[in-house]
Image (spheres, helix red, strand yellow):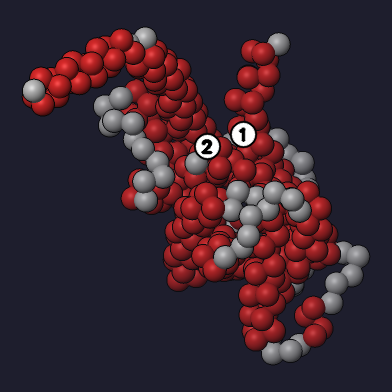
């Protein structure tokens, strides 16, 4: 029974991150549909975090009302950076990049996040290679490079078209645009925005890891970050839209579904799970699941948005999955090694303590000898 419980605890972060990627894939598809419906990017981001705040704030006040530490200026500053780098600014640039390129393209470009996170985590001491020539170290480095190579292969190489299925469903109601049909300048600018998203996402994970050390409350952290992101995005939307209140109208349509889904699930529950996984396994573990989102988005886009699948997409996805498993194996081997070191350290401390307890006569005899010497000196 204990082995089963331990196995569940070991695979829980992995399962939660897979669920998170499934939810994010659904949110990306809704984003594409809402943008196609003409919804403003800034208003969409503002509504997302307004709904997220309204959902997470009562949960945080109820669940963590007793064990929540006091908020100081450093925690507020870190929450502000998280809300900007991992919230309002990140989502806005992501949507702009998706509009200039395509859903699959921007998702593929953001797979550089694990490499950027790995470098930043090494710089801040939050991640260790474990010795570049050790098995765990080589697995993490090679797995990260393999994931990046797979993402680049998927993006830059098409090859022959693979017709596995045809649903004849196109929720966009117009032919899907491919890279050859888009303006080169817009595509380049969209690529730069996607690269900026990688650095923002990596920076958020690093800052979130630092914030969790002093404020280890997942629900309260998510509520605080959502509140700040809602204020930032609402002010920005009011400035961009020039007080055009017609842009803020929501009906019972795809726009309402998008902001409610992404607010409650993507920015609410899934960010809470990601914060918990950052505390348990570190920022690299969380970022390395972003390639899985690419595979899911490519499948959804081909099924429902009539985006075509090519040989390069399949080969790139296979490399991404292999790289993901390599990094996870390296992380698991490192954690097993650290767990094995704890009993040996404890046993060493126990042996040293027993040695001190079992040798009182030595200290007594040494004390008597010193007293005899002092007595002889007095005579």
Residue under pointer 2: 281
Residue closest to the far front: 379
- To which quarter of the image does residue 220 belong? bottom right
Residue drawn at the location 74% of the way across and 50% of the way down: 66
- To which quarter of the image does residue 99 belong? bottom right
Judged from the image, the secondary structure of the residue bearing numbered disc 2 is helix
Q: Is residue 143 visible?
A: yes
First in sequence, mark 1 or 2: give its number.
1
Asked if labels 2 and 1 touch by Cβ distance under 8 angstroms, the answer is: yes
Judged from the image, the secondary structure of the residue bearing numbered disc 1 is helix
Residue drawn at the location 43% of the way across and 49% of the way down: 117
Quarter of the rendering occupied by the C terminus = top left
Tally the marks.
2
Q: Is residue 110 visible?
A: no
Residue under pointer 1: 13
Above or below, 188 relative to 163? below
Q: Residues within 10 Å of mark 1 (few under 14, many from 20)?
A: many
Distance between mark 1 and mark 2 Cα atoms: 8 Å
Quarter of the rendering occupied by the N terminus = top right
Residue drawn at the location 55% of the way across and 62% of the way down: 75
Q: Left or right: where does residue 271 sit relative to residue 190? A: right
């Amino acid at each position: 029974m204990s082995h089963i419980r331990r196995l569940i605890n070991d695979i829980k972060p992995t399962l939660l991150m897979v669920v998170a990627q499934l939810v994010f894939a659904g949110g990306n598809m809704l984003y594409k549909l809402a943008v196609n419906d003409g919804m403003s990017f800034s208003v969409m981001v503002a509504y997302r975090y307004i709904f997220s705040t309204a959902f997470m704030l009562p949960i945080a006040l109820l669940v963590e009302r007793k064990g929540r530490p006091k908020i100081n200026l450093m925690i507020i500053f870190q929450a502000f950076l998280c809300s900007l780098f991992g919230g309002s600014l990140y989502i806005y640039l992501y949507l702009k990049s998706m509009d200039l390129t395509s859903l699959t393209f921007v998702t593929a470009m953001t797979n550089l996040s694990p490499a950027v996170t790995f470098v930043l985590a090494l710089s801040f001491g939050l991640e260790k290679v474990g010795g570049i020539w050790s098995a765990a170290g080589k697995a993490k480095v090679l797995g990260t490079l393999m994931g990046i190579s797979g993402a680049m292969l998927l993006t830059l190489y098409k090859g022959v078209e693979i017709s596995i299925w045809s649903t004849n469903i196109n929720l966009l109601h117009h032919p899907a645009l491919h890279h050859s049909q888009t303006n080169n300048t817009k595509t380049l600018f969209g690529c730069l925005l996607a690269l900026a998203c990688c650095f923002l996402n990596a920076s958020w994970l690093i800052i979130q890891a630092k914030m969790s050390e002093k404020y280890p409350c997942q629900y309260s952290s998510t509520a605080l970050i959502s509140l700040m992101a809602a204020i930032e995005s609402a002010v920005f939307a009011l400035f961009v839209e020039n007080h055009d209140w017609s842009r803020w109208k929501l009906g019972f349509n795809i726009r309402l579904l998008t902001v409610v889904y992404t607010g409650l699930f993507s920015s609410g529950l899934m960010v809470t799970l990601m914060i918990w996984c950052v505390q348990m396994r570190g920022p690299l573990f969380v970022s390395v699941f972003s390639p899985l989102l690419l595979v899911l988005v490519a499948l959804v886009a081909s099924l429902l948005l009539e985006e075509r699948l090519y040989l390069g997409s399949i080969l790139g996805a296979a490399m991404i999955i292999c790289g993901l498993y390599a990094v996870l194996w390296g992380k698991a081997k490192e954690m097993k090694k650290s767990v094995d070191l704890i009993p040996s350290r404890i046993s060493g401390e126990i042996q040293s303590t027993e040695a001190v307890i079992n040798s009182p006569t030595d200290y007594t005899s040494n004390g008597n000898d010193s007293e005899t010497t002092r007595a002889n000196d007095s005579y």
